[in-house]
Amino acid sequence: MIAVILGTRPEIIKMSPVIRECEAKELDFFILHTGQHYSYEMDKMFFDELELPLPWHNLEIGSGSHAEQTGRILAGVERALVEERPDIVLVQGDTNTVLAGALAAKKLHIRVGHIEAGLRSFDRSMPEEVNRVVTDHISDYLFAPTKTAETNLLNEGIDRDNIHVMGNTVVDALYQNLEISRKKSGILAELGLKPKEYFLVTAHRQENVDSEERLKNIIECLRLIHNKYSLPVIFPMHPHTVKRIDEFGIDTEDINVIKPLGYLSFLQLEANARLILTDSGGIQEEACILGVPLVTLRDNTERPETLDVGSNVVAGTDPVKIFESVGWMMRKDNRWKNPFGDGDSAKRIVRLLQAEQN
């Protein structure tokens, strides 16, 4: 039996191809959802939207400090694994759910497969970096998305036999979910937008939204970009970011601040944007695959492949650097090669797991 452990919407998205492949192969599996970020009702809608089976277990952990959240997830996952006794646990990415899920399984002598293993920003001040490194070093199967990720793992002394370069399931997810989104979402018409005639922005990382200076710099530059190019700047803003904007008294005039969107609507906004500005790692990958130029509002990235092919530039939060980077990427030819795989990563992962169990 396979246990698929996830806790955030990005994990649901990137695990969706694996879940669909397990269904297609009629494998014995179940989903355990920790509820790290969202309420059960919100996530139930998300599973329905993506046409996925509902979790057998929903821990409804919610927010908290890193230690509190990780501890609650660890205890809850352990109880579920003791009850179900799976042969292998699959986790994806770099969240507290990933770390706690892998650790709970390992303590129970259950094999762990880490999807998207080997990503490194080389910045240990980032909680996500700590989660990635620890999870990789206790996993039995390291499903690296690229050769760069494989090299990172080998440099840390991880056994080559445990590393499997499979491509990134984000490619599978985009190909599968983009078609669903075309049928179900009319977000461009709702917002009065034309394809390739708007900028899309996201910012959610604590180092950006909890810093008055960094957040002011980002907003200031977005206004400059709007005035320079006379294109709408669409910013689906998380409630926490809205709260910080209000606390810091930051003026968002000239920016179209909207409420957070469902995944399918957001996917349509991504695919049709002229350019994306974000501090999200996953969106760096998605934009690269979709052929949309991107500027990263961080000082580093764990997706160096996007820099190598030219789909992304790291600008930090200095307004001058962001403005210059946008100008550079606006002139960029977007016919780069997708470095993340062919869309069959989930099939390869499930095929390997099947072979291991036979």
Image (cartoon, rainbow, N blue to C red):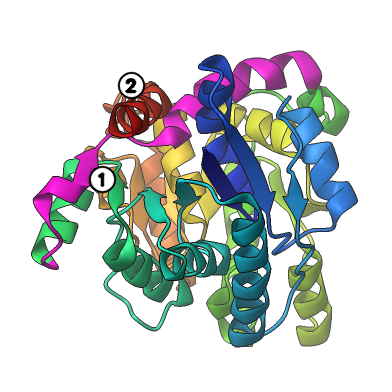
**Which of the image's four quarters has the C terminus?**
top left
Q: Give the amino acid type for the residue marked by disc 2 in the picture.
A: Asp
Q: Which residue is mark 2?
A: 342
Q: Is residue 71 left or right of residue 113?
A: right
Foreground pick, 56 / 180:
56
Residue 356: % across, % down: 29, 34
Residue 116: % across, % down: 37, 48
Q: Give the amino acid type for the residue marked by disc 1 in the picture.
A: Glu
Disc nearer the start of the sequence (1/2): 1
| Dominant secondary structure of the residues highlighted in magenta in the image | helix
Q: For the magenta stretch, what is the residue range?
A: 156-184
Q: Which residue is mark 1?
A: 305
Foreground pick, 66 / 323:
66
Mark 2 Cα-neighbour bin, 10 Å: few <14, some 14–19, many ≥20: some
Q: Is residue 243 left or right of residue 287?
A: right
Residue 38: % across, % down: 78, 59
